[in-house]
Image (spheres, rainbow, N blue to C red):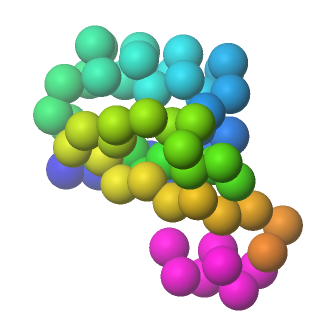
Amino acid sequence: MKKILLTGAAGRIGSSFRQYVEQQAGDRYTLRLVDRNLDALGDPGRHEAFGINVADIDACRQI
């Protein structure tokens, strides 16, 4: 299974891309959902969710 890092996952484009992957790719991909507002991501389901700012290099290294 491949992993995709999706930054801005709670935004309009990020949430649309997440929905597309879930509908079209099935279980072939796992998403690593990243947004500075973790609560806005909702339930990550089978995906991993991280509430970090991508401008924070140290936080990015943890994922």
The structure residue drawn at horizontal position 19% and vertical position 24%, both measured from the top left corner, is: 26
Q: Relative to 7, is 4 on the left or the right? A: left
Q: Relative to 33, is 28 on the left or the right? A: left
Q: Is residue 6 magenta?
A: no
The answer to whether residue 51 is above or below residue 46 is below
Q: Is residue 59 magenta?
A: yes
The structure residue drawn at horizontal position 53% and vertical position 82%, both measured from the top left corner, is: 62
Q: Which residues are magenta?
A: 57-63
The structure residue drawn at horizontal position 34% and vertical position 41%, both measured from the top left corner, is: 44
Residue 12 quadrant: top right
Where residue 37 sits in the image (x, y, percent)?
66, 48
Where residue 30 sits in the image (x, y, percent)?
29, 45
Residue 27 quadrant: top left
Residue at the extreme front: 39
**Is residue 13 something one can see in this rendering?**
yes
Name the dominant secondary structure of the magenta segment: helix
